Image (spheres, coloured by chain):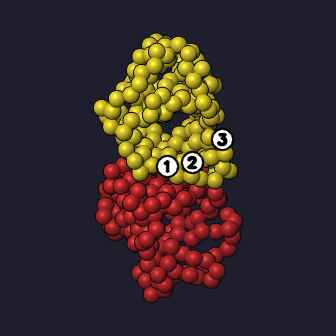
Chain colours: A red, B yellow
Amino acid sequence: MGVEIERKFLLASDDWRKCVENTLEMRQGYLSRDAQSSVRVRICGERADINIKSTRDGIYRLEYEYPIPMQDALDLIRHVAHRPIIEKNRHIVHLGRHCWEIDEFFGENEGLVVAEVELGAVDEPYERPDWLGREVSTDSRYYNSNLSKLPYKYWKDEG
Amino acid sequence: MGVEIERKFLLASDDWRKCVENTLEMRQGYLSRDAQSSVRVRICGERADINIKSTRDGIYRLEYEYPIPMQDALDLIRHVAHRPIIEKNRHIVHLGRHCWEIDEFFGENEGLVVAEVELGAVDEPYERPDWLGREVSTDSRYYNSNLSKLPYKYWKDEG
């Protein structure tokens, strides 16, 4: 169990690519996303897990995550999860004492790239590199759960 | 992962009580119950688990279950699960080589008692004791996921 405080940004340029230390391939599907919570199955490299998040109140929410067998995750994503599946590469960039996760989406969300940092407190200071664009922390369209309902390629105004 | 084949019955009398070998207290809440699947958190004695079932097609469906920490289960049931929570005692009765689970509901489902047997194949024969009433396997009102949406006490026709 944990409390997650995240800030999410668009990217102002491609300069972040020079700072990437590691890239993880991710594939995830949602079993539910409703007013109370979302339930997600994710495959990341050799790892598979199920994740439960309570509904976000701005940048604050409850989160639970449990490892599950890879075959279960493959079956759940293939047969049970809502369409479309989220496909993305997660690029890791360390800046100061924070770890940034830059998600580059494919499939029905091709063209979308967002950078996210997890903070220990709502007002915790963090380094803002030049390649960081507009903050979208509170724009629910960018939640992965919503990108699997209304993918980026169907957005009319991509602001 | 598994395929679950279950048959569910009402009770014709209270005679099953004489056959009970064991009784488990259960408390469970649903994180979701939609067209594709249900996601349930259950506390049963000292055990807590999360359970995923794909949508039932008659008496056939996919099922996955994973243990989780008790405190997570308590928090999920208290803060995240849909209302009302399902409260029941599960009474265990062995008949021949089958194990019957007789669920006696409380709270908003007080007054409802159903007996369920899990079979290895759709056409597997099983003993039918005198205390067994009408079969309700395909009546979706009796699914626990639906009893947490429309509890028994709100049913107009309890047939």
Residue under numbered circle 3: B45
Identify the residue position indicated by label 1 in the image.
B65
Q: Is residue A128 above or below residue B141?
A: below
Give the distance between the C-alpha atoms of the residues marked 3 and 2, in whole angstroms. Answer: 11 Å
Q: Nearer the viewer, mark 3 or mark 2?
A: 3
The chain identifier of the residue carrying mark 2 reads B
Task: Check if mark 2 and mark 1 are on a common chain.
Answer: yes
**Considering the numbered disc 2 on the image, is that residue within a helix, a strand or a loop?**
strand
In the foreground, B52 or B148: B52
In the image, B84 versus A124, the foreground residue is B84
Residue extending farthest bottom: A18
**Tag 1 or tag 2, which sits nearer the N-term?**
2
Instruction: Give the percent coordinates (x, y) of residue A62.
Output: 61, 54
Visible residue check, residue B13: yes
Q: Secondary structure at mark 3?
A: loop
Compute the Cα span from label 3 to label 1. 16 Å
Q: Residues within 10 Å of mark 2 (few under 14, many from 20)?
A: some
Label ID, residue B49: 2
- Marks 2 and 1, how far apart in space? 7 Å
Could you say whether the residue bearing mark 1 is in a helix, strand or loop? strand
Image quadrant in which the C terminus of chain A is located: bottom left
* Left or right: A78 in relation to B29: left
Q: Amino acid at mark 3?
A: Gly
User: Residue A137 lies in what quarter of the image?
Assistant: bottom right
Q: Compared to B23, does A4 lie above or below?
A: below
Q: In the image, what residue occupies the spot 39% across and 64% down?
A: A27
Q: What is the chain letter for disc 3?
A: B
Look at the picture and state if A85 lies above or below B90: below
Please state which amino acid type lies under the numbered disc 2. Asp
**Residue B67 located left or right of residue B141:** right
Q: Earlier in the sequence, mark 3 or mark 1?
A: 3
